[in-house]
Amino acid sequence: MTTRDERNRLIEENLPLVGYLASETHARATHVPREELASAGALALVTAADAFDPSLGVPFGAYARRRILGAFADEMRSMDWATRGIRRRIKETTAVQETLSAALGRQASVAEIATTMGVSHDEVAGALADAARTVTTLDEVYESDLASYTPLPEESAVVAERRAVLEHAIAALPERMRSIVHAVYIDERPVKEIAEELGVSHSAVSQQRAEAIRLLRDALERYYRDGEEAPTTSRVSASVPLLRRGSTAPGHPAA
């Protein structure tokens, strides 16, 4: 463990990291006040400094970054605008939209979805608008982190383990969701192109992608919570760049 002087030094030197991550996250999740993120991040930084163990060989910056992003996630979950009822309505509407689109061989209209569901045009339009909105909140913040974070050399052993866990988690996803994850993150295809190929809407693919990210993140968190006291890399983010560089999920050929 660190001495008090070392702890204070770590906090002071890494306060700019909190500000940077708060600004970066707020830019992608504007419904969360930047000051709320900064406050949660500062507290996470202090907690990280208190818990940091240099003997693990992991740089404090990487360790603190994971803790700060985790605090942001908790903050955004607590402020999530979408109630359980709204989420249920979104799920039902997008499911009908996808089924109809597949049956018709084209994008189902709002009127067709409304008729099938026995609800008003405005209710369907509102649910689809909410669906588009939900994928720009917490899940999009994590998705950006998945694509941008490169693990440090000191983290390579943990990254290898995390990659293996992630591959098993991807293999366990429902077939449609697994295909979307593979297309987006390994083949790096645009969502619009995937939607056209599947005969569904852009928002339906985005919703499936967001749900896949949530499931993969939860799988990793459960694994490390049950099997390891203090994981040393940031959530799923350390694994996806490795998958992009050539490792594939089980059941998928290399892109």
Image (cartoon, rainbow, N blue to C red):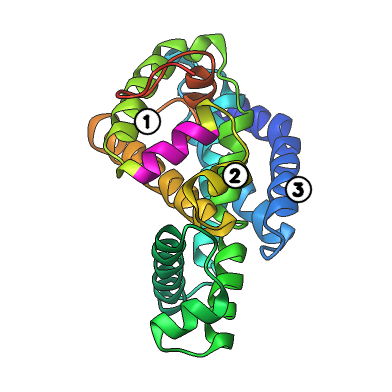
Q: Residue at x 51, y 10 (%)?
A: 154
Q: Residue at x 40, y 69 (%)?
A: 96
- Pick whichever of labels 3 and 1 is earlier in the sequence: 3
| Spatial separation of the CA atoms under disc 3 and disc 2 | 26 Å
What range of the chain is rendered magenta?
176-184
On residue 230, which mark appears? 1
Of residues 185 and 148, the one drawn nearer to the viewer in this rendering: 185
Q: Name the outermost residue toward the left.
A: 226
* Crowd rating for badge 1 (residues with CA inside 10 Å; few <14, some 14–19, many 20+): few
Query: Which residue is tagged 3?
Result: 23
Residue 128 against residue 196 in the figure, above or below: below
Check whether the beta carbons of the residues at disc 3 and disc 1 lie within 8 A of each other.
no
| Spatial separation of the CA atoms under disc 3 and disc 1 | 26 Å
- Pick whichever of labels 1 and 2 is earlier in the sequence: 2
Q: Where is residue 230 shown, x and y percent of the image?
A: 37, 30
Q: Where is residue 119 shown, x and y percent of the image?
A: 45, 89
Q: Residue at x 76, y 37 (%)?
A: 16
Q: Name the outermost residue toward the front.
A: 104
Query: Which residue is tagged 2?
Result: 191
Q: Quadrant of the N terminus?
A: top left
| Residue type marked 1 | Ala
Nearer the observer: mark 1 or 2; the answer is 2
Q: Where is residue 151 shown, x and y percent of the image?
A: 55, 19
Q: Can the viewer see residue 197 in this picture?
A: yes
* Left or right of 85 in this view: 152: right
Please tell me whether mark 3 sits on a helix, a strand or a loop. helix
Residue 159 against residue 188 in the figure, above or below: above
* Left or right of 33 in this view: 177: left
Q: Residue at x 62, y 56 (%)?
A: 136
| Spatial separation of the CA atoms under disc 1 and disc 2 | 35 Å
* Left or right of 25 in this view: 81: left
